[in-house]
């Protein structure tokens, strides 16, 4: 099945609220646990989260690593507003900074010690822009952990995944999940992107029927 693009930013207020309310506990906790397992030496420093949405992963990571600072970047103003609220409620405003901008425009005063991203790449029309941002914004030797959806073979297979994992979710979330599966990349496509961007030191894994994960350290 060919990739079908979905809108790059999730900047509809209702869509942002539905996303922020949804239960991504298992996925987001798993992502942070994987980061801690892969990079046990990272105890302090600056972690950059690309496409941070309502900041659930920055909050979990900042709690797990009390000496780390986290910057989250998202181009959606409603998502960032929800994130700012959540960060304040978590009492982490001194260590988590959120920026409303597209990752293609992000410039840091100093490159990050780690770059993470969950569920962003499928939104970006040109995937190479995403990997270029990872390379530009991370220090040499920085840790990288990126997870996203895996494009199924057919629209029917995508619908079956939505029915299996999101049957109880509101219609707006099921619609977004379906569209995201159609916009996602296959693991072969991601591997080719890494080769093209000279990032083949990063390794790709397919942990389940709907995700791929890329991790490792930059040269
Ligand atoms: C599916 S959400 C994932 C949010 C968060 N990472 C999580 O795991 O809960 C994708 C987010 O990426 C943002 N996004 C899409 N394209 C972007 C871009 N080019 N620059 C910055 N943010 C972008 C969207 O606005 C949306 O909030």
Image (spheres, grey):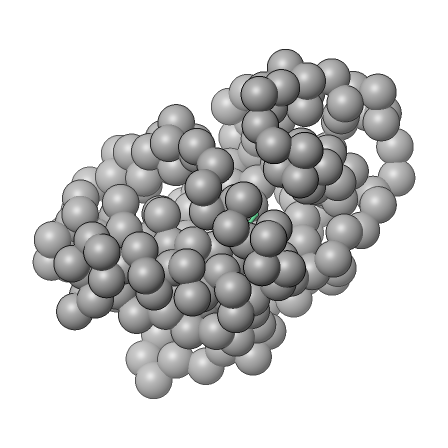
Q: Say which quarter of the image contains residue 190.
A: top right
The vertical placement of 139 against 40, above or below, is below
48 or 110, which lies in front? 48
Name the side, left or right, on which 146 lies relative to 28: right
Q: Residue at x 56, y 66 (%)?
A: 76
10 or 121, which lies in front? 10
Name the side, left or right, on which 156 lies relative to 53: right
Image x and y of residue 125, in percent: 75, 59
Q: Residue at x 51, y 50 (%)?
A: 17
In which quadrant of this rendering is ligand 1 seen? bottom right
The count of marks equals 0
10 or 58, which lies in front? 10
Location of the C terminus (image quadrant): bottom left
The vertical placement of 129 against 15, above or below, is below
Image x and y of residue 58, in percent: 32, 53
| Residue furthest left as drawn | 67
Regarding residue 95, the answer to whether it shows in the image is yes
| Residue furthest right as drawn | 2
Q: Residue at x 69, y 60 (%)?
A: 8
Location of the N terminus (image quadrant): top right
Image x and y of residue 204, in percent: 54, 36
């Amino acid at each position: 099945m060919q990739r079908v693009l979905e809108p790059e930013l999730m900047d509809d207020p209702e869509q942002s609220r539905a996303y922020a309310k949804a239960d991504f506990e298992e996925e987001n906790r798993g992502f942070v646990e994987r980061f801690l397992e892969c990079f046990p030496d990272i105890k302090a420093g600056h972690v950059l989260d690309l496409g941070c949405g309502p900041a659930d992963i920055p909050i979990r990571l900042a709690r797990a690593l009390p000496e780390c600072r986290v910057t989250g970047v998202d181009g959606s103003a409603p998502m960032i507003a929800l994130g700012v609220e959540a960060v304040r409620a978590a009492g982490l405003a001194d260590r988590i900074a959120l920026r409303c901008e597209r990752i293609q425009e992000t410039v840091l005063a100093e490159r990050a010690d780690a770059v993470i991203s969950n569920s962003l790449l499928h939104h970006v029309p040109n995937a190479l822009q995403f990997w270029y941002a990872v390379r530009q914004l991370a220090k040499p030797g920085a840790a990288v952990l990126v997870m996203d959806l895996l494009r199924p073979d057919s629209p029917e297979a995508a619908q079956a995944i939505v029915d299996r994992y999101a049957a109880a979710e509101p219609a707006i979330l099921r619609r977004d999940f379906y569209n995201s599966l159609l916009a996602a990349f296959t693991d072969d496509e991601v591997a080719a992107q890494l080769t093209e961007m000279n990032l083949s030191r990063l390794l790709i894994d397919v942990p389940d029927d709907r995700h791929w994960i890329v991790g490792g350290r930059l040269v």
